[in-house]
Amino acid sequence: MRSPQFSSFVILVVLLAVFAVADGNFLSPLNISNMMAFLPELGIIALGMTLLLTAGEFDLSVGAVFALAPVVVMLLAQNAGVDIGVALLVGLLLCIAIGAINGVIVTKIGISSFLVTLSMLLIVRGAALYITQGFPLKSWDQPGFFVTLLAGSVNIGSFRFYTSLWWFIALSLLAVYVLRYAKLGNWISAIGSNRNAAVARGVPADAVKIWLFIATSVLAGLAGMISAFRISAASPVAGTGYELEVIAMVVVGGTALTGGRGTILGTIVGALMLRTIRNGIVLVGVPGLAYNIFVGVIILAMLILHALLQKNAARS
Amino acid sequence: MMQEVLRLQNLQKSFGSVRALKNASLTLSEGEVVALLGDNGAGKSTLIKAISGVFPIDRGDVYVRGEKVSIRSTREAMDLGIETIHQDTSLAPDLSIARNLFLGREPVNLKWLGVFAPLDLAKLRDAASTLLKRVGISKKLDADALVSTLSGGERQSIAISRAMQFAAKVIILDEPTNNLGVEETHGVLRFVKEMREAGHSVLLITHNIHHVFEVADRIVVMRRGEIVAEQTVADTDLLTVESLITGADMSALMKRAQ
């Protein structure tokens, strides 16, 4: 009951109630559909980030990968005439390469992931800007199998659901399974909790971390593709600042920044919470420019709450 | 003569220009507790890290039950029956006792799924409870409790019982009584005796000579990367051992040289 994800959940419910009372449109089908369209894009990245943070590392390059992957895919498809399926495969390989480079430098050379992925952020964002010359690409409005797969939508009553929501749900279930029930999850938590102990038991800590960097990068690229297909365009500046928003979602949900303790359910609550705040405070009339003040205050309040709960738990 | 379990022959290891191990040879027999003594920097840690597969040795041979082996990873050491309990670093505090006991050797269903195989949680819990009961700490400890909620002595007990459970031939204890209270220390020493009775060989690294006389059969002293003395506990006394460690008493050294 005192778990961080539970307290986050309670606060999420309170926030939902406050916004619902403050603005009648908050729970309207249109608004819920909108929130559910945005939610998976950051949420999918947050799933990878949760696993990575649990293993004691994090990745600041996700926002840049979110932009570069669709930019490369669309450039290949639009300008080079490459088949969209092949272009997507190239994008996937690119994400794998970025994650692998992050992971190998962090584990084999031993530089902190903060510095490695900060450099990678600049390289990847710079690459996206350079190859597009800073301009958003022409809009992509050719429907097809992949567009339907990533950004299709269905109307149920007056609600509109994007396929990205199903991706998010499926990936969430997979992440919950991996972290809580699979052998791999035991290793991930052990590595983040005490790397030396894990290594002494024969856990391949470096390999696990490298694969988690790859998974996070691939998920960021996937989220970028979903977003680009949904709005039918790729922009080199998409996803700017997403890395911090994603990390905020993860820690608000109760995952420890220091590793060892991760919760996917908490991350889902955290993603919903930040989404709700972003949406709700605009609806209740807070000026858009003041948005970050609220987000910052709420994140800080959540973290203080988690810290106090933990102190209490330690005492009792 | 008891059967030889582990034999190290002329192990050498350098880190850059520092020769951490010069020519270390050592044997360990079944059901024997050998204490490895030496000042800081004498090479004790290097020696045990080499045996437990933390890093490879430069030169020299390792024999397990008379068979020559090469230990390239901690996993290989474990598979050969060598379990090491490192100082304070053997357990993951954010994991439950049960999960720690089986870390790296998790019982799983659907084995073909590899690292994605689901943990056999029922088996994990049962085995952990059985183990805790066997080592006599089940009354206090729940297999699902997080290790971070345990005391230092309890953690050491968990780490030791884990090593015993996997029927290790050789158990290496690196400063097992560091930072422990009096009662907890006695608990750990009792464990060492139990391990010997159960037929395990124990290599005990410690700074506390009193503990050595309480549990060890034989004493090996290291200084500057070399093994400088080897004596059975029955044939020596505290003062002699102390002077061997510091190198103050040259007559003892000379005796060994002959």
Image: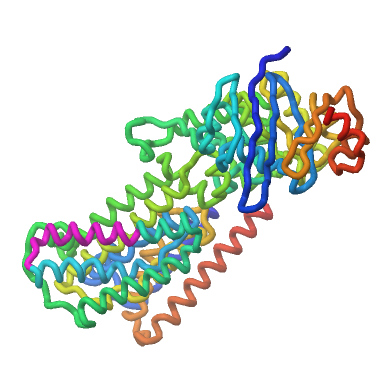
Q: Which residues are magenta?
A: A81-99
User: Which residue appears at 13% of the width and 62% of the height?
Assistant: A147
Residue shown at the point (55%, 55%) measured from the top left: A2
Q: Is residue A111 left or right of residue A287?
A: right
Q: Nearer the viewer, residue A143 or A84?
A: A84
**Can residue B58 be seen at all in this image of the molecule?**
yes
Question: Which corner quadrant of the image does residue A21 belong to?
Answer: bottom left
Residue at horizontal 64%, vertical 59%? A311
In the figure, A38 relative to A178: above or below?
Answer: below
Q: Residue A223, how many percent across, how many down?
A: 26, 63
Name the image quarter holding residue A28. Answer: bottom left
Task: Identify whether A72 is placed above or below B258.
Answer: below
Q: Residue furthest front?
A: B258
Q: Nearer the viewer, residue B33 or A264?
A: B33
Vertical comparison of B59 with B195: above or below: below
> Would residue B186 be found to the left or right of residue B201 on screen?
right
Horizontal and vertical percent for residue B143? 58, 35
Q: Main secondary structure of the magenta part?
A: helix
**Is B54 inside the magenta-drawn segment?**
no
A84 part of magenta stretch: yes
Residue in the picture at 47% in, 47% down? A205
A242 or A2: nearer the viewer: A242
Q: Position of residue A128 (x, y in %)?
A: 26, 74
- Residue A17 visible: no
Query: Vertical placement of A155 versus A208: above or below?
Result: below
* Residue A312, x across and y down, in percent: 64, 58
